[in-house]
Amino acid sequence: MVESEHDAETGENTIVLRPNGSLSRKQAWALLAFCGLLMGMIGFFSFLVGAWLVLPFSGLEWLLLAYCLHLSLRQSQLREVITITDAVVRIEKGRDRPEQTYKFQRAWVMIDWMQSPIRGRPSRLALKLHGKEVEIGRFLVESERQALARELKVLLH
Amino acid sequence: MSVATHDDAHAHDHHDHGPAKGFMRWVTTTNHKDIGTLYLITGLIMFFVGGAMALVIRAELFEPGLQYVDPHFFNQMTTLHALIMVFGAVMPAFAGLANWMIPMMIGAPDMALPRMNNWSFWLLPFSFVMLASTLFMDGGAAAAGWTLYPPLVLQTGNALPFTVFTVHMLGMSSIMAAINIIVTVFNMRAPGMTMMKLPLFVWTWVITAFLLIAVMPVFAGAVTMLLTDKFFGTSFFNAAGGGDPVLYQHLFWFFGHPEVYILILPSFGIISSIIPTFSRKPLFGYASMVYATSAIGFLSFIVWAHHQYTVGMPIAGELYFTYATMLIAVPTGVKVFNWLATMWKGAMTFETPMLFAIAFVVLFTMGGFTGLMMSISPADLQYHDTYFIVAHFHYVLVPGAVFALFAAAYYWLPKWTGHMYDERLGQLHFWLTTISVNICFFPQHFVGLAGMPRRIPDYAVQFAEFNAMSSVGAFVFGFSQLIFAYVIYKAIQGGEKATSEVWEGAEAHGLEWHLSSPPPYHSWTEAPPKEIISDLH
């Protein structure tokens, strides 16, 4: 998903890119709590009737579910923030905070958009200057990436 | 600033062009369609292996007396037939359908955890080879029935730890598949695809996945306790050491009854997809179908002891389990009513998937009714461990789960292969299968009511005619499935090209019909437009 913002005072344009994810963290916790309650109750009652060996299997399985949800959510928490000022184009990539930051001089930066030779395969969008290249929006769907390329072309013109 | 546009200058930088070539494609694949195909082929192969075992059983029961196999081998066959059909044929086939269809139906590019998906499939072939190898071990394979009740199962020879390990591996595979489905459906739905827009097949699989993750640890724990009783001197199920063999029955059926719903809920989803398409109407009562499926899922946890009325439980317990079990008829009735209402005044046509779907509704309902009979504890004392039970669960699982799988295969085969299947052969397969399945299982109600016990290779001469009929039906049913295998092979090889919609008006019923036939290697690299999703029935 692509969200754009223009600050009229500073003239800065900010574009936030994020992958599609239909589950929020809150919902994920609710899901885990529901599964934990269900599996915990079953494991606990099994323990009470003497079948205590059920409990570790329930616990392990809940942990696996939690880990898998964490992996999937981690993927959907990726963010790319492109800030365009008069002088520079700044790209920040990360999850909760910027983990990688790249800067290009606005006047010289190039948009590099490559279509795949195979029909139906995703294209590739990058910003590059002086041999330095940063791919952006890898997790976007094709139409969003194309729209982003068009928007960048207008903003950087 | 300038813009550079390339077509293929950096094509070699892409790592996801399409399928790799050769055998290793299938070993290392993380693509949901490839893994779905692997599951489906495994399911079909195991269906034939388990079916061959059923034919050994029916050959022996063709006439009274002992003909071909000794009683111990007969019991190995009944045990392995059930384990293979449940865990090897039906569950992998549903997992295959889930892998193929769920990402396409929710507008996702793949499953959420593709590497785990690969692993969860590849556990299966090794598990089945290990299970089959127990037939050649000292003492033979497990012969205590698929329930693996102690103390009988503890008399198994060297095969016991291998059987238990097989169960663990199959359980791990199922759990990983279930977790993958839950994470995929909850986190990878396309924008606009709300939970109440999900196709019924996806809904039924989500509920199935919750059932799986809830009950699998119970089964894993129970069989591990069998192992520790046998080899580590514990007494979980050993009365002499203060344990209780009935505890195992409770644990097994706390897993086993939801397991039955694990086998049937995805069938409900399939039938709910097919009937609207061939009735050319939206599904009647979508929301009530979702709530009914959830209700069935919940009820499946609280009825387990109706399998154990004869263990001598308190009368209050028998009453509770009788009434709780009867309750299941309510949401199931809602479903049957909705399917009938969907067909009512529809512009129906009767292609092979629809024929199997209609046969499912009729014959599954019959199986459901005999289930109601057995829910009544005083009546069940007569039916318990007789062929009436065998008839009941085969009506639920063969014209139920297996017919739904046939219907699904015919329904989605043109989408998968890009070719229409041979309709004439499909109809021949349907009629031979439907007639023979009834010849096979219907007489078993009568011999069961008259007292013929299950899992015994010999019987009184009064049951001879019905058993002969049943065996003839079984052999016709078994060999009819070769037609099914041939139809699939023929469609893969070629034939009339299928359109993306395949069936008239199908686009209104699901996102999968908006992809080409066959679909691209990676589904939905571009999210489906919201208008399509909001227009879905």
Image (cartoon, grey):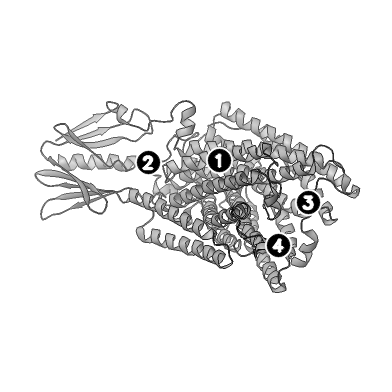
Instruction: Give the mark nearest the N terminus, 3 or 2.
Output: 3
Mark 4: which amino acid?
Answer: Gln
Q: Is residue A28 left or right of residue A40?
A: left
Instruction: Give the mark nearest the N terminus, 4 or 1.
Output: 1
Name the residue that disc number 1 marks.
Answer: B124
Name the residue that disc number 3 marks.
Answer: B454
As measured in the structure, the alpha-carbon distance from the residue carrying label 1 to the one carrying label 3 is 29 Å
Name the residue that disc number 4 marks.
Answer: B308
Q: Are labels 1 and 3 assigned to the same chain?
A: yes
Q: Is residue B438 left or right of residue B516?
A: right
Q: Badge 3 local density, few (<14 within 10 Å), some, or many (20+)?
A: some
Instruction: Give the mark nearest the N terminus, 2 or 1.
Output: 1
Q: Are labels 4 and 3 assigned to the same chain?
A: yes
Which numbered disc covers residue B526?
2
Q: Chain ID for label 4?
A: B
Do callouts 3 and 2 mark residues in contact (Cβ within 8 Å)?
A: no
Q: Badge 2 local density, few (<14 within 10 Å), some, or many (20+)?
A: many
Depth check: give the residue in front, B484 or B455: B455
Instruction: Give the mark nearest the N terminus, 4 or 3.
Output: 4
Q: Chain ID for label 2?
A: B
As measured in the structure, the alpha-carbon distance from the residue carrying label 2 to the one carrying label 1 is 33 Å
Depth check: give the residue in front, B197 or B435: B435
Mark 3: which amino acid?
Answer: Arg
Q: Badge 4 local density, few (<14 within 10 Å), some, or many (20+)?
A: some
